Image: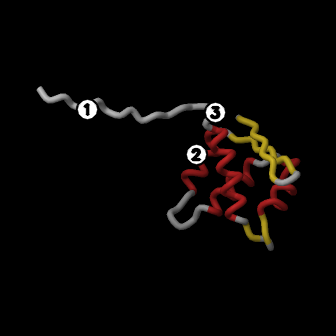
Amino acid sequence: MKNITVSVGDKELIFNVDVSDYNQLINEQMPNDKVAPIYNFLSRTVDNNCKKDFRDAVLVDGQPNGIVLMQIGGIVTEEMADNIQVVVKKPKAMQAS
């Protein structure tokens, strides 16, 4: 499990995330629904001591704010990669014989 701290305004939110949490996020995403899965992912993984601050940061009139959620979710999922570098190797041009 990885502990990831994200600052949102003047609040620090701590997320406790592991690979199964991330996999569940990916499995829940549908073509027309991105906000609910990221909200559920972050709600499941935010530290219990940060839940109120999390809700205050991401809910507007009781509705999830997709812009804020996508920013936080992007940071959390990027940190999950933990410096793994994935590079596409270009094939060498075929030489004429």
Along the polypeptide, which appears first: circle 2 or circle 1?
Answer: 2
Q: Is residue 56 found left or right of 78 in the rendered image?
A: right
* SS for dot 3: loop
Q: Which residue is mark 3?
A: 82
> Alpha carbon of mark 1 to alpha carbon of mark 3: how far?
33 Å
Q: Residue 96, percent across and down? A: 14, 29
Which dot marks residue 9?
none
Mark 2 or mark 3: whose residue is earlier in sequence: 2
Image height check: is 92 above or below 71?
above
Q: Residue furthest left?
A: 97
Q: Quadrant of residue 34?
A: bottom right
Image side of residue 96 versus residue 1, left or right? left
Quarter of the image with the N terminus in it: top right
Residue tagged 2: 23
Residue occupied by mark 1: 93
Q: Amino acid at mark 3?
A: Asp
Quadrant position of residue 67: bottom right
**Foreground: disc 2 or disc 3:** 3
- Asked whether the beta carbons under mark 2 and mark 3 sit within 8 Å of each other, the answer is no
Q: Which quadrant is the C terminus positioned in? A: top left
**Would you call the spot at circle 2 few (<14 residues within 10 Å), some (14-19), or many (20 or more)?**
few
Residue 62 at x, y = what percent?
79, 71
Q: Residue furthest front?
A: 96
Tell me residue 33's x, y (percent): 57, 65
Q: Secondary structure at mark 1?
A: loop
